[in-house]
Amino acid sequence: MNVFTDKYQRIVVKVGTSTLTYPTGHLNIRKIETLVKCISDLQNSGKEFILVSSGAVGAGLGKMGYHPAKMTVEEKQAAAAVGQCELINMYNEKFGFYGHKIAQVLLTKDVVDDEVRRHNAHMTFSVLLSQRCIPIVNENDTVSNEQLKFGGNDTLSAIVAILCNADLVINLTDIDGLYDKDPRTNEDAKIISVVDKLDDNVFKCAGGAGTERGTGGMLAKLEAASMCVCCGIPMIIANGANPEILYDIMDNNYKGTFFSANER
Ligand code: GLU
Protein backbone atom coordinates (compact mmCIF):
# COMPACT_ATOMS: atom_id res chain seq x y z
CA MET A 1 0.00 0.00 0.00
CA ASN A 2 1.36 3.37 -1.03
CA VAL A 3 -0.55 6.41 0.24
CA PHE A 4 0.77 8.61 -2.59
CA THR A 5 -0.21 6.15 -5.29
CA ASP A 6 -3.59 5.35 -3.79
CA LYS A 7 -4.56 9.01 -3.74
CA TYR A 8 -4.21 9.37 -7.50
CA GLN A 9 -6.58 7.17 -9.45
CA ARG A 10 -7.33 9.13 -12.61
CA ILE A 11 -4.14 10.47 -14.13
CA VAL A 12 -3.46 12.70 -17.13
CA VAL A 13 -0.02 12.13 -18.67
CA LYS A 14 1.15 14.82 -21.06
CA VAL A 15 4.06 14.01 -23.29
CA GLY A 16 5.81 16.45 -25.61
CA THR A 17 7.13 16.32 -29.16
CA SER A 18 10.76 16.35 -28.07
CA THR A 19 10.15 13.13 -26.11
CA LEU A 20 8.14 11.37 -28.82
CA THR A 21 10.16 12.22 -31.92
CA TYR A 22 13.78 12.47 -32.98
CA PRO A 23 15.14 15.74 -34.37
CA THR A 24 14.84 14.00 -37.77
CA GLY A 25 11.06 14.25 -37.40
CA HIS A 26 10.61 10.50 -37.07
CA LEU A 27 8.92 8.82 -34.14
CA ASN A 28 11.10 7.66 -31.28
CA ILE A 29 9.79 4.12 -31.18
CA ARG A 30 11.80 3.09 -28.14
CA LYS A 31 10.36 5.88 -26.01
CA ILE A 32 6.83 5.35 -27.28
CA GLU A 33 7.10 1.62 -26.53
CA THR A 34 8.33 2.29 -22.99
CA LEU A 35 5.64 4.90 -22.39
CA VAL A 36 2.91 2.57 -23.65
CA LYS A 37 4.25 -0.35 -21.59
CA CYS A 38 4.30 1.70 -18.36
CA ILE A 39 0.85 3.20 -18.87
CA SER A 40 -0.56 -0.24 -19.78
CA ASP A 41 0.98 -1.82 -16.71
CA LEU A 42 -0.24 0.92 -14.37
CA GLN A 43 -3.68 0.78 -16.00
CA ASN A 44 -3.63 -2.98 -15.26
CA SER A 45 -2.96 -2.13 -11.62
CA GLY A 46 -6.31 -0.31 -11.56
CA LYS A 47 -5.41 3.26 -12.49
CA GLU A 48 -7.12 5.25 -15.24
CA PHE A 49 -5.05 7.14 -17.77
CA ILE A 50 -5.66 9.90 -20.26
CA LEU A 51 -2.71 10.54 -22.53
CA VAL A 52 -2.29 14.04 -23.96
CA SER A 53 0.16 13.42 -26.75
CA SER A 54 1.91 15.98 -28.92
CA GLY A 55 4.01 14.88 -31.85
CA ALA A 56 1.53 15.16 -34.73
CA VAL A 57 3.23 18.12 -36.37
CA GLY A 58 6.67 16.77 -35.43
CA ALA A 59 6.05 13.35 -36.96
CA GLY A 60 4.23 14.80 -39.98
CA LEU A 61 7.00 17.17 -40.93
CA GLY A 62 9.47 14.30 -41.01
CA LYS A 63 7.22 12.35 -43.35
CA MET A 64 6.48 15.34 -45.57
CA GLY A 65 10.11 16.45 -45.62
CA TYR A 66 9.34 19.93 -44.25
CA HIS A 67 11.80 21.98 -42.25
CA PRO A 68 10.27 23.12 -38.93
CA ALA A 69 11.47 26.70 -39.28
CA LYS A 70 10.27 27.08 -42.86
CA MET A 71 6.73 25.67 -42.77
CA THR A 72 3.74 27.77 -43.75
CA VAL A 73 0.62 27.56 -41.57
CA GLU A 74 -1.07 25.37 -44.20
CA GLU A 75 1.94 23.03 -44.36
CA LYS A 76 1.91 22.76 -40.58
CA GLN A 77 -1.77 21.83 -40.64
CA ALA A 78 -1.12 19.28 -43.39
CA ALA A 79 1.83 17.88 -41.43
CA ALA A 80 -0.43 17.55 -38.37
CA ALA A 81 -2.97 15.57 -40.40
CA VAL A 82 -0.28 13.18 -41.63
CA GLY A 83 1.53 12.92 -38.30
CA GLN A 84 -1.60 12.39 -36.21
CA CYS A 85 -2.37 9.27 -38.32
CA GLU A 86 1.11 7.95 -37.80
CA LEU A 87 0.99 8.65 -34.07
CA ILE A 88 -2.42 7.09 -33.41
CA ASN A 89 -1.56 4.11 -35.56
CA MET A 90 1.50 3.52 -33.43
CA TYR A 91 -0.44 3.92 -30.16
CA ASN A 92 -3.21 1.62 -31.38
CA GLU A 93 -0.72 -1.10 -32.25
CA LYS A 94 1.36 -0.78 -29.08
CA PHE A 95 -1.53 -0.44 -26.60
CA GLY A 96 -3.33 -3.24 -28.48
CA PHE A 97 -0.33 -5.50 -27.84
CA TYR A 98 -0.99 -5.09 -24.10
CA GLY A 99 -4.73 -5.63 -24.59
CA HIS A 100 -5.81 -2.01 -24.09
CA LYS A 101 -8.38 -0.03 -26.05
CA ILE A 102 -7.51 3.51 -27.06
CA ALA A 103 -9.67 6.36 -28.33
CA GLN A 104 -8.59 9.40 -30.32
CA VAL A 105 -9.95 12.71 -29.02
CA LEU A 106 -9.04 15.86 -30.97
CA LEU A 107 -10.13 19.13 -29.41
CA THR A 108 -10.19 22.81 -30.29
CA LYS A 109 -10.66 25.70 -27.90
CA ASP A 110 -14.16 26.58 -29.19
CA VAL A 111 -15.33 23.14 -28.00
CA VAL A 112 -14.37 23.74 -24.39
CA ASP A 113 -15.46 27.40 -24.49
CA ASP A 114 -19.01 26.36 -25.39
CA GLU A 115 -21.02 25.01 -22.47
CA VAL A 116 -22.99 22.42 -24.46
CA ARG A 117 -20.02 21.12 -26.44
CA ARG A 118 -17.86 21.06 -23.30
CA HIS A 119 -20.50 18.97 -21.57
CA ASN A 120 -20.57 16.61 -24.58
CA ALA A 121 -16.80 16.22 -24.40
CA HIS A 122 -17.02 15.61 -20.64
CA MET A 123 -19.64 12.89 -21.17
CA THR A 124 -17.59 11.25 -23.92
CA PHE A 125 -14.55 11.11 -21.62
CA SER A 126 -16.72 9.64 -18.84
CA VAL A 127 -17.98 6.85 -21.09
CA LEU A 128 -14.53 6.10 -22.47
CA LEU A 129 -13.01 5.94 -18.99
CA SER A 130 -15.84 3.81 -17.63
CA GLN A 131 -15.07 1.37 -20.46
CA ARG A 132 -11.38 1.31 -19.43
CA CYS A 133 -10.42 2.99 -22.72
CA ILE A 134 -7.31 5.14 -22.77
CA PRO A 135 -8.20 8.45 -24.45
CA ILE A 136 -5.33 9.85 -26.51
CA VAL A 137 -5.89 13.58 -26.76
CA ASN A 138 -4.35 16.22 -28.98
CA GLU A 139 -5.30 19.60 -30.28
CA ASN A 140 -7.02 19.33 -33.67
CA ASP A 141 -4.12 21.14 -35.31
CA THR A 142 -5.42 20.56 -38.83
CA VAL A 143 -8.36 22.91 -38.33
CA SER A 144 -7.24 25.09 -35.44
CA ASN A 145 -6.26 28.65 -36.32
CA GLU A 146 -5.14 31.36 -33.91
CA GLN A 147 -8.69 31.87 -32.55
CA LEU A 148 -9.25 28.15 -31.95
CA LYS A 149 -5.89 27.36 -30.39
CA PHE A 150 -5.39 26.38 -26.77
CA GLY A 151 -1.86 27.74 -26.82
CA GLY A 152 -0.18 24.34 -26.70
CA ASN A 153 -0.65 20.94 -25.16
CA ASP A 154 0.50 22.04 -21.71
CA THR A 155 -2.67 24.13 -21.50
CA LEU A 156 -4.68 21.37 -23.16
CA SER A 157 -3.54 18.84 -20.55
CA ALA A 158 -4.80 21.13 -17.76
CA ILE A 159 -8.14 21.65 -19.53
CA VAL A 160 -8.54 17.90 -20.08
CA ALA A 161 -7.68 17.18 -16.44
CA ILE A 162 -10.36 19.62 -15.29
CA LEU A 163 -12.87 18.24 -17.83
CA CYS A 164 -12.26 14.67 -16.64
CA ASN A 165 -12.03 15.42 -12.89
CA ALA A 166 -8.53 13.94 -12.89
CA ASP A 167 -6.60 13.45 -9.64
CA LEU A 168 -3.14 14.24 -11.01
CA VAL A 169 -1.38 15.61 -14.11
CA ILE A 170 2.09 14.32 -15.00
CA ASN A 171 3.82 16.53 -17.55
CA LEU A 172 6.70 14.61 -19.11
CA THR A 173 9.16 16.89 -20.82
CA ASP A 174 12.83 17.22 -21.79
CA ILE A 175 13.98 18.77 -18.51
CA ASP A 176 14.01 17.27 -14.99
CA GLY A 177 11.60 19.83 -13.53
CA LEU A 178 11.51 23.47 -12.52
CA TYR A 179 14.92 24.88 -11.58
CA ASP A 180 15.56 27.98 -9.48
CA LYS A 181 17.43 29.41 -12.50
CA ASP A 182 18.03 28.36 -16.11
CA PRO A 183 20.10 25.13 -15.86
CA ARG A 184 21.34 25.57 -19.44
CA THR A 185 23.27 28.67 -18.46
CA ASN A 186 23.77 28.23 -14.70
CA GLU A 187 25.78 25.26 -13.49
CA ASP A 188 24.62 25.77 -9.91
CA ALA A 189 20.91 25.73 -10.79
CA LYS A 190 18.91 23.60 -8.36
CA ILE A 191 15.71 21.73 -8.98
CA ILE A 192 12.68 22.82 -6.95
CA SER A 193 11.04 19.60 -5.81
CA VAL A 194 7.85 21.00 -4.29
CA VAL A 195 5.95 24.18 -5.11
CA ASP A 196 3.27 24.87 -2.52
CA LYS A 197 2.47 28.37 -3.70
CA LEU A 198 2.64 29.24 -7.39
CA ASP A 199 3.38 32.95 -7.09
CA ASP A 200 5.36 35.50 -9.12
CA ASN A 201 8.65 34.31 -7.59
CA VAL A 202 8.04 30.85 -9.03
CA PHE A 203 7.12 32.28 -12.43
CA LYS A 204 10.42 34.22 -12.40
CA CYS A 205 12.27 30.87 -12.42
CA ALA A 206 10.78 29.93 -15.80
CA GLY A 207 12.97 30.51 -18.83
CA GLY A 208 11.86 31.01 -22.46
CA ALA A 209 10.39 28.67 -25.06
CA GLY A 210 11.16 24.98 -25.57
CA THR A 211 12.86 23.22 -28.46
CA GLU A 212 12.07 24.06 -32.08
CA ARG A 213 10.05 20.84 -32.39
CA GLY A 214 7.84 21.46 -29.35
CA THR A 215 5.98 24.58 -28.37
CA GLY A 216 6.11 24.12 -24.59
CA GLY A 217 8.72 25.90 -22.50
CA MET A 218 8.58 26.22 -18.72
CA LEU A 219 6.28 29.25 -18.71
CA ALA A 220 3.52 27.31 -20.49
CA LYS A 221 3.97 24.49 -17.98
CA LEU A 222 3.67 26.85 -15.02
CA GLU A 223 0.52 28.37 -16.51
CA ALA A 224 -0.90 24.86 -16.89
CA ALA A 225 0.13 24.04 -13.31
CA SER A 226 -1.59 27.19 -12.13
CA MET A 227 -4.86 26.16 -13.85
CA CYS A 228 -4.63 22.66 -12.34
CA VAL A 229 -3.81 23.62 -8.77
CA CYS A 230 -6.58 26.26 -8.69
CA CYS A 231 -9.01 23.44 -9.52
CA GLY A 232 -7.58 21.16 -6.84
CA ILE A 233 -5.47 19.01 -9.17
CA PRO A 234 -1.76 18.63 -8.39
CA MET A 235 0.73 18.54 -11.25
CA ILE A 236 4.19 17.02 -11.63
CA ILE A 237 6.83 18.10 -14.13
CA ALA A 238 9.39 15.36 -14.77
CA ASN A 239 11.77 14.21 -17.46
CA GLY A 240 10.26 11.93 -20.09
CA ALA A 241 13.68 10.78 -21.37
CA ASN A 242 12.92 7.45 -19.71
CA PRO A 243 9.13 7.05 -19.43
CA GLU A 244 9.70 4.43 -16.70
CA ILE A 245 9.84 7.49 -14.45
CA LEU A 246 6.07 6.93 -14.25
CA TYR A 247 6.81 3.98 -11.93
CA ASP A 248 9.09 6.17 -9.79
CA ILE A 249 6.36 8.79 -9.60
CA MET A 250 3.86 6.18 -8.46
CA ASP A 251 6.38 5.11 -5.80
CA ASN A 252 6.76 8.78 -4.79
CA ASN A 253 10.47 8.44 -5.37
CA TYR A 254 11.32 10.56 -8.38
CA LYS A 255 13.25 13.59 -9.55
CA GLY A 256 10.88 16.35 -10.63
CA THR A 257 8.70 19.21 -9.42
CA PHE A 258 5.42 18.62 -7.58
CA PHE A 259 2.88 21.46 -7.56
CA SER A 260 0.55 21.08 -4.57
CA ALA A 261 -3.11 21.65 -5.28
CA ASN A 262 -5.46 24.04 -3.53
CA GLU A 263 -8.27 22.36 -1.58
CA ARG A 264 -11.09 21.27 -3.93
N1 GLU B 1 -0.50 19.68 -31.02
C1 GLU B 1 0.87 19.78 -31.45
C2 GLU B 1 1.33 18.47 -32.10
O1 GLU B 1 0.72 17.45 -31.94
C3 GLU B 1 1.82 20.06 -30.33
C4 GLU B 1 1.54 21.27 -29.51
C5 GLU B 1 2.33 21.26 -28.20
O2 GLU B 1 3.16 20.38 -27.97
O3 GLU B 1 2.12 22.15 -27.40
O4 GLU B 1 2.33 18.48 -32.77
Image (spheres, grey):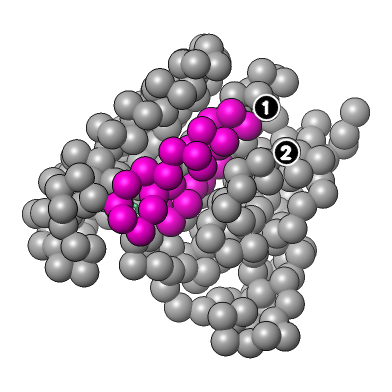
Residue that carries the numbered disc 1 in the rendered image: 42
The residue at the point 40 percent across, 36 percent down is 137
User: Which region is colored magenta?
Assistant: 13-39
Name which quarter of the figure residue 149 lies in.
bottom left
**Circle number at residue 247:** 2
Q: Is residue 207 magenta?
A: no
Q: Amino acid at mark 1?
A: Leu
**Circle number at residue 57:** none
Quarter of the picture containing the C terminus is: top right
- Asked if marks 2 and 1 touch (Cβ < 8 Å), the reply is yes
Depicted 186 relative to depicted 127: above or below:
below
Q: Is residue 230 visible to us here?
A: no
- Crowdedness of circle 2 by 10 Å Cα count: few (<14), some, many (20+)? some
The residue at the point 44 percent across, 38 percent down is 29
> Which type of secondary structure does the marked residue at label 1 adopt?
helix
Q: Amino acid at mark 2?
A: Tyr
Real-space Cα distance between discs 2 and 1?
8 Å
Please provide percent x and percent y for residue 143: 16, 45
Please provide percent x and percent y for residue 135: 45, 28
